[in-house]
Image: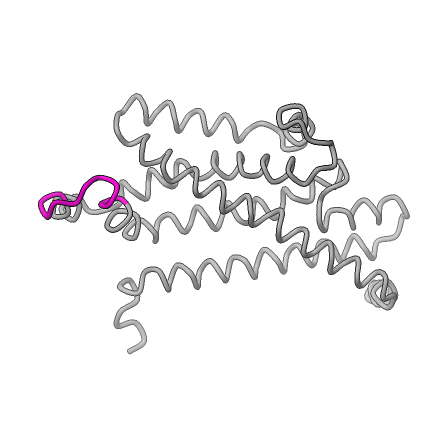
Amino acid sequence: MLGGIGLYLSSPTNREKVLGLLGEHVYLAILPLLIGLAVALPLGALARRGALLRTGTVQASSVLYTVPSLALFVVMPGILGTSITSPANVVVSLAVYTTALLVRPVVDALDAVPGHVVAAAIAMGYRPARRFVAVELPLAVPVLAAGVRVASVSNISLVSVGALIGIGGLGELFTEGFQLRYPAPIVIGILLTLVLALVVDLLLVGLRRLATPWAHAGVGS
């Protein structure tokens, strides 16, 4: 198996293709993660304004996440007016999935912010928008980060499904391997997908630590 992988990667054309697919995979996974997080944050904050609104928003997001990814990839061109092989289909579809996946973690993270801190911010004259950005959101990061890590791994995995419509980053190595009955590209695709998920997860852990220095004050000192 290692010999087959080495033989496959010995070709400059194959190496260039693998690197290009890896870059495409990163783009198709990370951009929707950022878009989904940007949409889920205000949705989660809005959902906390009432019990009925919270239940409806959380349940709707849960139902939306159950839609098969391939079905959404195929339907999206009709909604966006794009071609079936446009990267926008995967980006928008995964942004929808990310938003659906993160709404509940956003709600839970904001619920975890101590009430007395919010009350103190109100007493100091913080308006809702400023209080959310300067007080609630930073304190919600430790809980929210766990949801973002799950969403990142989910996106990295789901991108590969896009290979079935011609856009799937490393997933294209899977289809190539199956078509040629040659396992080397399949193994390379699997290994690079796992490594990418691990690297992104470690980066998110590092970003969480940088964003919450107070949570680690005194640790190791």
For this orientation, the residue located farthest to the bottom is 221
**Region in magenta:** 122-132
Residue 158, located in which quarter of the rendered image? Answer: top right
Direction from residue 172 to residue 90 in the image, left or right: left
Q: What residue is drawn where x is 58% and y is 27%?
A: 67
Which residue is found at the position 71% from the left and 44% from the top? 168
- Residue drawn at x 51%, y 39% is 98
Q: Quadrant of residue 72?
A: top right
Residue at the extreme left of the image, as rendered:
123
- Where residue 130 sits in the image (x, y, percent)? 24, 45
Task: Verify whether residue 75 appears in magenta.
Answer: no
Snapshot quadrant of residue 187: bottom right
Work out whether residue 16 or residue 208 is closer to the camera in this orientation and state it.
16
Taking depth in this image into account, of 49 and 195 the one nearest to the observer is 49
Please tell me whether residue 177 is drawn above or below residue 192 in the rendered image. above
Q: Position of residue 114 (x, y in %)?
A: 19, 47
